[in-house]
Amino acid sequence: MDVDGCLIDPNPDIIGIGIRISIYVLSLASPLISFFLHSTELSGSIESSLGATGLALLLTTVIQTALGGIALFHALCVLHLLGLVGISIRPKGQYPATVVRTTTLLVLYVVAVSGSLIYFIYVFANAPHFGNQPECNYETKYVLFGVDIQATNAVIRWIFVAIFAMLALGLVMWLVCMSGAACCLALDCGCGRSSSSDDRESELGADDGLYDGYAGSAHANAWSQFIRMLGQLGASIYMMVMLELIIQRNELLPNIADWTFGQVLAMMMLIGPLIESVSLLLGKVKMKPSDNSHGRGGGGGGFEAAVARGRFSMPER
């Protein structure tokens, strides 16, 4: 097969610079905000946005594969992008935790994760003739720890197939365990039964020692959060660097640098997390006492305090 000078169409709407920057910023901001700002709302908002982006990316990739718009090169890039954003179905609102809601979200999550595993098993199993440019597959390079590897290499691709198959098996085992736990709770098989009054009294008596170990426990928790943040940052940086090397070391058409509508839209989607971050920082700014003293009457607190207490009313004519 003559593959000399085979150039891959990069499709900027998939791996354009704007899309990559948007995903990079969110994936790096999530662990940093969670550790330094300690904002559950903001970190949850970013994680929800990342998970929804991952789900949308997976669905778009599957649809484009069915329509013949994806090459093996794109599938490898999507693998790294999904590694950055992940897949989650996590509504932002605080809704009642009913059994139907929890079960539905769990089923959707399992379908999405299993679908991604099956998709990449299919990609690597059919790597030599996958996608809309199979003539370029033998020149497509995958970068692993900085080393160029032929994407159609039989050993490498079947290792990936085995890894994704084991992940799928682990997902099945997790489902079995979850189903067993659900049955145990539903049938009241002794799981989570309340202790007797004597046990409660002994537990209350043991609470006196909790205060002694509180400082050490908080210190250990801070270290565990710090190590977790470093692990998340390290994994994200690795995925970013390898993705950039994959893009640089493959022969692509020059339209990779084009700023298309999809890339600009991806950049503008950062406005939402930016507004949340600014709101959080402004909320931490405390007003000076003199700022609250203006207009303070006999009731105290001024206009804002009166409204907050619900005691403000418009004067009658």
Image (spheres, helix red, strand yellow):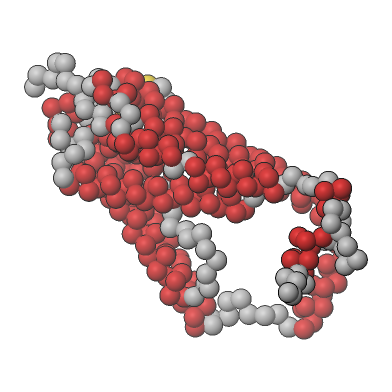
Q: Nearer the viewer, residue 221 or 254?
A: 254
Residue 224 seen anywhere in this rendered image of the structure: no
Query: Is 67 located above or below residue 97 in the figure?
Result: above
Left or right of 86 on screen, residue 71: left
Q: Nearer the viewer, residue 255 or 309?
A: 309
Q: Residue at x 55, y 53 (%)?
A: 44
| Quadrant of the rendering where the C terminus is positioned | bottom right
Q: Residue at x 69, y 49 (%)?
A: 283
Query: Is 238 located above or below residue 99 in the figure?
Result: above
As drawn, which residue projects farthest toward the right? 298
Q: Residue at x 55, y 66 (%)?
A: 94
Horizontal and vertical percent for residue 125? 22, 41
Q: Nearer the viewer, residue 311 or 77?
A: 311
Quarter occupied by residue 305: bottom right
Left or right of 209 on screen, residue 25: left
Quarter occupied by residue 8: top left
Quarter occupied by residue 209: bottom right
Horizontal and vertical percent for residue 29? 55, 39
Left or right of 78 on screen, residue 9: left
Residue 273 seen anywhere in this rendered image of the structure: yes
Query: Is 222 located above or below residue 260 in the figure?
Result: below
As drawn, which residue projects farthest toward the top? 4
Q: Residue at x 27, y 34 (%)?
A: 74
Horizontal and vertical percent for residue 146? 41, 22
Left or right of 289 on screen, residue 121: left
Query: Is 309 located above or below residue 63 in the figure?
Result: below
As drawn, which residue projects farthest toward the left? 1
Horizontal and vertical percent for residue 298? 91, 66
